[in-house]
Amino acid sequence: MTETTKVNLLGLTQPQLEGFFESIGEKRFRAGQVMKWIHHFGVDDFEAMSNIGKALREKLRACAEIRGPEIVSQDISSDGTRKWVVRVASGSCVETVYIPQAGRGTLCVSSQAGCSLDCSFCSTGKQGFNSDLTAAEIIGQVWIANKSFGTVPAKIDRAITNVVMMGMGEPLMNFDNVVAAMQIMMDDLGYGISKRKVTLSTSGVAPMIDELGKVIDVSLALSLHAPNDELRNRLVPINRKYPLAVVLDACKRYISRLGEKRVLTVEYTLLKDVNDQPEHAAQMVELLRDVPCKINLIPFNPFPFSGYERPSNNAIRRFQDLLHQAGHNVTVRTTRGDDIDAACGQLVGQVMDRTRRSERHIAVRQLGDEAAPSASAANRT
Ligand code: SAH
Ligand code: SF4
């Protein structure tokens, strides 16, 4: 068997790993042992697996591997924020950001290199789509981050308490790999993170929200960004396919299936003079009247040639107050990790664009502080 045909065990869920052991004529319980070595202890060498006999270790070495994405750079900010740039198999680079906050630590994870949905204010969208990340490349970001804190078994003083799928890409457009990775995040043999503290953010791929509800019960965030279809069609083009009424219905169904007082997180990037006016707040109140939710306002993070501006602090506060007065729980995201360019609007991803704009190999990307409030949101639910 050659290197390239080896099975990468990093991205396998527990049932998949059990199936793998069965397929090589071994007992299913080996899956649990190997998962602990991989995810709790960050091991990538079968030789280190001391409770596995020599013969099986050799067999594994011949047909399997444990391989995360290649680390291109890692930075630690003076405020504790950490950022990794990793290269995935397609050759593109994506980012992962860790944001420490009082009592919790949130990891913001990428799901695709680039994105095909082309939201008008998003630099990932401007880069076009390159590739879906494999499950190993998605969970590999958690694996790398976890290892950077030492190999602490799950649930004991864990550095990563929350994960938000809010890095590059639209997670619902890479459904199977994202679901598998989230299952490993929540598995006690993986990272043992509570379902409430794993959050998937979507721009509104309505049918896939229903599919998600059939297989997993993580927290859900909707990138709303506009309170009416006319404006949302311009800012979030997927809205032309799945308009507000359709996507909000799907979100309500998803949330109601979860029960237990879980709510939708509504993300709203504030763009100066575009969606930040009092009438937008009023429409939003009306739109969300029967949606159990909390609202996360994201002041726009500018990037070159975006054509948008961030509203003034006064305008942001005014918008927040209007929603708050209508009874909403509203938070505003703050910037973290400035000194390592990990703040919203500062991250750099390198996407080999297959579809268009191929001259733009380097573009500014935001995600650093996007994770923080959703993490707090996930904590509160
Ligand atoms: N594709 C998913 C998740 C990744 S983006 C989604 O769209 O939900 C995470 C969040 O950052 C989304 O709400 C997105 O709309 C927002 N965002 C994108 N570009 C931004 C920018 N320049 N400034 C502020 N927020 C931005
Ligand atoms: Fe894609 Fe999300 Fe950016 Fe829209 S906001 S282009 S869905 S990554």
Image (tube, grey):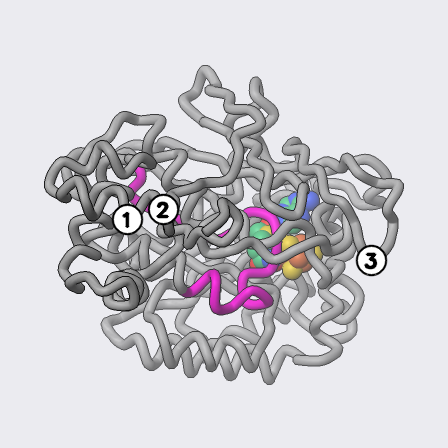
The residue at 71%/80% (across/down) is: 241
User: The disc labelled 3 sits on which kind of residue?
Assistant: Thr
To which residue does mark 2 refer? 62
Tag 2 and tag 3, C-beta contact below 8 Å: no
To which residue does mark 1 refer? 59
Q: Is residue 178 magenta?
A: yes
Q: Residues within 10 Å of mark 3 (few under 14, many from 20)?
A: few
| Alpha carbon separation for disc pair 2 and 3 | 37 Å
Q: Residues within 10 Å of mark 1 (few under 14, many from 20)?
A: few
User: The disc labelled 2 sits on which kind of residue?
Assistant: Ala
Q: Report the mark closest to the observer, 3 or 1.
A: 1
The residue at 53%/77% (across/down) is: 208
The residue at 30%/75% (across/down) is: 258
Label 3, ligand 2: CB separation under 8 Å? no
Label disc, if present, on residue 334 of the rendered structure: none
User: The disc labelled 1 sits on which kind of residue?
Assistant: Lys
Tag 1 and tag 2, C-beta contact below 8 Å: yes
To which residue does mark 3 refer? 355
Q: Report the mark closest to the observer, 2 or 3.
A: 2
253 to 265, vertically: above or below: below
232 or 93, which is in the foreground?
93
Q: Helix or strand or loop: what does disc 3 sit on?
A: loop
157 or 113, which is in the foreground?
113
Residue 214 location (% of width, % of height): 38, 81
358 to 325, vertically: above or below: above
| Alpha carbon separation for disc pair 1 and 2 | 5 Å
The residue at 67%/33% (across/down) is: 348
> Residue 324 vs residue 363: left or right?
left
State whether residue 268 appears in this view: no
Q: Which residues are magenta?
A: 160-179
| Alpha carbon separation for disc pair 3 and 1 | 41 Å
